[in-house]
Image: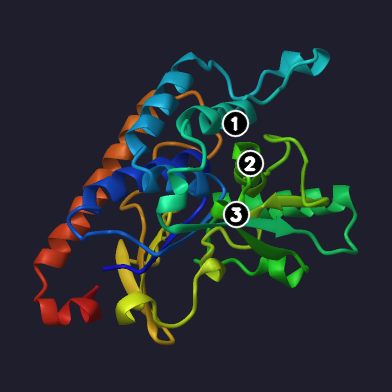
Amino acid sequence: MFDQVVFAGGGGRCIWQIGFWESIVDEVQLSPRVVSAVSAGGLVAGLLLINRGQDAVQYVRSVFSVNRKNAYWKNLFRDEAVFPQYAICRNGIRELFDNGLEDLRTVAELRLAVTRPPAWMVGPLALTLGAVIYYTDKGFPRSLHSTSATRLGFRQTFYRAQDCSDMDEFEHLILSSSCTPPFTPRLQLNGAEILDGGVVDNVPVAGLDAGQGRAGQGRVLILLTNRFPGYPDSFTQRQGVQLWTYVQPSRVLPIKVWDFTNPEAVTATLNIGRADGRALLTQLKSIAPETRVQAL
């Protein structure tokens, strides 16, 4: 039904995408050709494409159960990380993609977004402005597609996961797409400093193919993680010859982007995603086949 899918970023909120995806994947025969994703949405997308969604949930629950804090300030005076999120994500990639890249090479083309600062902007300034834009958009979402960073010269670049030569390169690409100091270290990709791809647009539609897809399809499914009060839970907009169907959580999610201490919030967020997926299926089934495209 959908030729391409977009996974927004959102840290722990991307657990919602797992619940939603698993509720609809079989019913709508969801087998996209292209997936465009950013940050934690990229990690979730890769795992869902190889049917490791529930393994990811179990990993997150297990780690969150033993991680007591989101910041270990005493480590400022030790040779240890203050923020545990980076190591948790890195270890999750290594554990959950245990078959390397082989599984990914047989599924949809996965495109991951990173942000490149403008050439004239020195590192500390780029990091500061990027962080301000990133956390403002996450905490106070105003529009589906932010333009603040683009106006300042930041640019979004996409890399294919399947082009990675080995797991080290793939791991670095995922972490680069999620690079948000101070929660992660400063990172470089191909010799240039980068930031989380969501700094430019946390809903990375720029990674999509334009025009019709396979078999004349032009349907795109876009999975958000923020709640945008001015929009319904699901809605479709025409973009040229394509139809973009946005789906957002039906309520504000109980998990915060960088809260890695709350396994109960993981379960609650997963269940909201499942319920929202079932709600979309009910909506689809109530619409006559010949009018579904216009109504969704």
Q: Amino acid at mark 1?
A: Arg
Residue, disc 2: 175
Disc 1, disc 2: CB below 8 Å? Answer: yes
Q: Residue at x 87, y 50 (%)?
A: 123
Q: Quadrant of the C terminus?
A: bottom left
Count up the numbered dots. Answer: 3
- Residue 79, quarter of picture: top right
Q: Where residue 89 appears, x then y in whole percent?
A: 56, 32
Q: Secondary structure at mark 2?
A: helix
Q: Work out how far the residue at label 3 is from the one at label 1, CA to CA, in angstroms.
A: 19 Å
Q: Residue at x 47, y 30 (%)?
A: 98
Closer to us: 112 or 64: 112
The crowding category of the residue bearing disc 1, from other C-alpha atoms within 10 Å (few below 14, some 14 to 19, many at least 20), is some
Q: Of tags 2 and 3, which is closer to the observer? A: 3
Q: Where residue 203 appears, x then y in whole percent?
A: 51, 61
Mark linked to residue 165: none
Q: Quadrant of the N terminus?
A: bottom left
Q: Amino acid at mark 3?
A: Asp
118 lies above or below 124: below
Closer to us: 181 or 243: 243
Q: Amino acid at mark 2?
A: Leu
Mark linked to residue 90: 1
Q: Where residue 83 appears, x then y in whole percent?
A: 67, 26
Give the mark nearest the N terminus, 2 or 3. Answer: 3
The crowding category of the residue bearing disc 3, from other C-alpha atoms within 10 Å (few below 14, some 14 to 19, many at least 20), is some
Residue, disc 3: 163
Q: Work out how far the residue at label 1 is from the one at label 2, CA to CA, in angstroms.
A: 7 Å
Q: Work out how far the residue at label 2 is from the one at label 3, CA to CA, in angstroms.
A: 16 Å
Q: Residue at x 35, y 44 (%)?
A: 18
The crowding category of the residue bearing disc 2, from other C-alpha atoms within 10 Å (few below 14, some 14 to 19, many at least 20), is many
